[in-house]
Amino acid sequence: MKTANQDIKPITTKINEKGNIEIGGCDLVELANEYSTPLYVFDEETIRAITKSYKDAFKAYPKMKMMFASKAFMTKAICKIMQEEGFGLDLCSGGEIYTAKSADFDMKKTLFNGNNKTYEELCMALDYGIGTISVDNFFELAILDNIAKSQNKTVRILLRITPGIECHTHEYIQTGHLDSKFGFDLTQVDNAIELIKEEYTNLQLIGLHAHIGSQIFEKKVFYDEVDVIFKEIKRIKDKHNITLSEINLGGGLGIKYTENDKPISIYEIAETIIESIEEHSKKYNVEEPYLFIEPGRSIVGTAGVTIYTAGSSKQVPNGRRYQAVDGGMADNARPSLYQAKYTVEVANKPKEEEKEIVTIAGRFCESGDILAKDVNLPIIEEGDIICFYDTGAYGYSMSSNYNRVLKPAAVLVNNGKSDIIINRQTYEQLCENDIIPERLN
Ligand SMILES: *Cc1c(COP(=O)(O)O)cnc(C)c1O
């Protein structure tokens, strides 16, 4: 069955009677007028359709637990939606822990994950009652046990392992291959377990965690990942007499940024994973564990678009035409970080025939600040509203204040209503942490 990550546009996208693009029943041009631009627009129906697809696709596996990798897009409103949909949260910093707690999220349903959690963050995780910690390395095992002992607590942990699986995605977003900064190499797992058994007695090992990469289009890597993890569970049972009851396969399912992307259905991924678990649990005679997955991009990516206002333009003699917009690499780092491609439309003239090849440039002081190279669009005029699809994941969450440009606002649209979920930053907020030392005054 087809799922929303396989489409470029949010499921409610249409062209309304004014001839403008509308999402969640809201005209993008009117949203631009009301909230100004750049603006992140999130379609609630698309987010909920995807969470429902995930739940439905995995319902054949009774011990299923869904999580959202919050680094893709983390705000209090998203925490509320995830709580309502019955999802847990994968958190990877003190800031994400704080956000979840501030939204009254059920902290038992959270996992803290990351390759260099600080002492303070681990203390905070225990204070805030985080559900489980995915321990990434020996250093972390030692400090976490130390904190747990000092607070007289037992901490549920997973071991993050490097499964040695390569997926065909950009090098920067691969994580599961052997030469990776994340997780224990499989040859180090025995040593980690010995330490947990003998020394780190306040750590309770529950299961294994892996994550093979992001923007994945193949299902075979998930099949293989389950194989590697089950082999390891079997080995750990035989060698250490420890039965692990949870596995977490990470996230990584791809979305459709452009027509060239061919992401697979959530149902296909689920089928592959469940089949692989059934097969390998029989093969290795291991009881079926609780299964966690924690997608990020595929949950919020398709639901979000960014709208900009067209400003200056430049025709290079015998060269490209550049059209600048009022945002760029500080609100969407992905094009400059890893040459990410997007689908672009003009929200106030989506049907216009007249076309030209234009390059959409950002407004930041870097030549590399190009949002989309050589796209085919109607002739753009100053004031047109430019819509970038699929910016819901890793857009706002990677945003910065480069050039001291204010971070944009985000709205959640649904059924003709729009609600602010992130206010546009103000100049006061921009300077609030700046301090002029006495001697400079
Ligand atoms: C980033 C990350 C995810 C989410 O990846 P997506 O590609 O956004 O689905 C899940 N688990 C871990 C451990 C991650 O680091």
Image: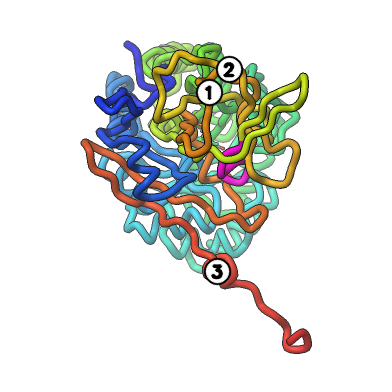
- Residue type at numbered disc 1: Ile
Crowdedness near tag 1: few (<14), some (14–19) or many (≥20) residues, C-alpha within 10 Å = some
Q: Which residue is mark 3?
A: 150
Front position in the image: 261 or 103 = 261
Asked whether 30 falls inside the magenta stretch, the response is no
Q: Which residue is mark 1?
A: 379
- x then y, percent, for residue 211: 56, 30
User: What secondary structure prevails in the magenta region?
Assistant: loop
Front position in the image: 159 or 38 = 38
| Circle 3 or circle 1, nearest the eye | 1
Q: Is residue 281 above or below residue 202?
A: above
Q: Is residue 246 visible?
A: no
Distance from the alpha carbon under mark 2 to that under mark 1: 6 Å
Crowdedness near tag 3: few (<14), some (14–19) or many (≥20) residues, C-alpha within 10 Å = few
Front position in the image: 148 or 170 = 170
Q: Which residue is mark 2?
A: 356
Residue 248: give its label.
none
Magenta stretch, residue numbers: 324-335
For ligand 1, tell me if the residue under mark 1 lies within 8 Å. Answer: no
- x then y, percent, for residue 292: 42, 32
Label 3 residue SS = helix
- Residue type at numbered disc 3: Ser
In the rendered view, does 336 fall on the left or right side of 97?
Answer: right
Identify the residue shown where x is 53% and y is 40%: 395
